[in-house]
Image (tube, helix red, strand yellow):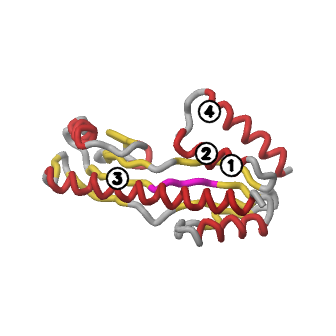
Amino acid sequence: MFLEAKYNKMKKLQYAVDNNLVDKEIMYFVDRINEEDEYYTTSSCIGRCGIMEFPKNVNTKIYSRWLGKWHHYATTDEMNIAIESASPDYDRLYFVLNSPIMHIACKDAFSAKKLLEIAYHNGLKASSIKSLSEKRYIVEFLTTMKLDAPIGFDGKLVVDDNYLNILLNESNLKLMKAREMLHRVYLKFDEEFSR
């Protein structure tokens, strides 16, 4: 049952790779995990920052939108262009940094525990077991690096350019540190499973 689910997920991953729908920067780790019989990845993101708009008087879960979203280290110009594209009557604008994240299906409790210990002891302190079932355990790799800062309300920015640049620089720095942590976990994973 686990290997069949892995086979099906790997077909979907290959489709995503073939159609350029993956974060290429994280594929080194995704591919390495998928080499092991007791694991397979279900989703991943190398981390991103961006500007998110929340409109007025509608369900924000459905109608919020990214004005700009960058998986690379963003620039001031990219941030400013995103902010300038906001609707004139938005409810809120947020500057957002999302940590790198991976979801990994594990064959059993032992393999999930081993994976979680590798993550936690090598910097991914927000990692956890996200779900348990007879079919699989899902481990989430996640750092504590994040940022959600309101920058606009009622169609108006409430921060100046200096503060926006501070947010951008902090975000790029946090994203770099988070990616370094993820790479450290990769190295430990590779060491553990190459024995």
Does the image show residue 44? yes
Residue 172's disc number: 3
Residue 17's disc number: 4
Q: Dot 4, how many residues are within 10 Å of its Cα: few (below 14), some (14-19), or many (20+)?
A: some
Inspect the image, locate mark 4, and give the three-letter code of the amino acid beneath it.
Answer: Val
Farthest-out residue, top = 19
Left or right: residue 88 compared with residue 174:
left
Q: Are marks 2 and 4 in contact (CB under 8 Å)?
A: no
Residue 22's disc number: none
Inspect the image, locate mark 2, and give the three-letter code of the amino acid beneath it.
Answer: Tyr
Q: Are marks 1 and 2 in contact (CB under 8 Å)?
A: yes
Rounded to the nearest angstrom, the CA distance separating label 2 from label 3 is 21 Å
Please give the name of the residue rendered at 53% of the width and 70% of the height, measured from the top-left corner: 125
Q: Which residue, given by chain and number where applicable, does mark 2 sit on?
A: 28
Residue 194: x and y in percent read 75, 57
Please give the name of the residue rendered at 63% of the width and 28% of the height, measured from the top-left corner: 18
Above or below — where is 160 with respect to 4? below
**Is 101 inside the magenta-drawn segment?**
yes
Looking at marks 1 and 3 on the same chain, the residue that comes earlier in the sequence is marked by 1
Inspect the image, locate mark 1, and give the three-letter code of the amino acid beneath it.
Answer: Arg
In front of the other: 28 or 62: 28
**Is 183 inside the magenta-drawn segment?**
no
Residue 59: x and y in percent read 39, 48
Residue 32's disc number: 1
Specify the principal SS of the magenta part: strand
Residue 160: x and y in percent read 13, 53
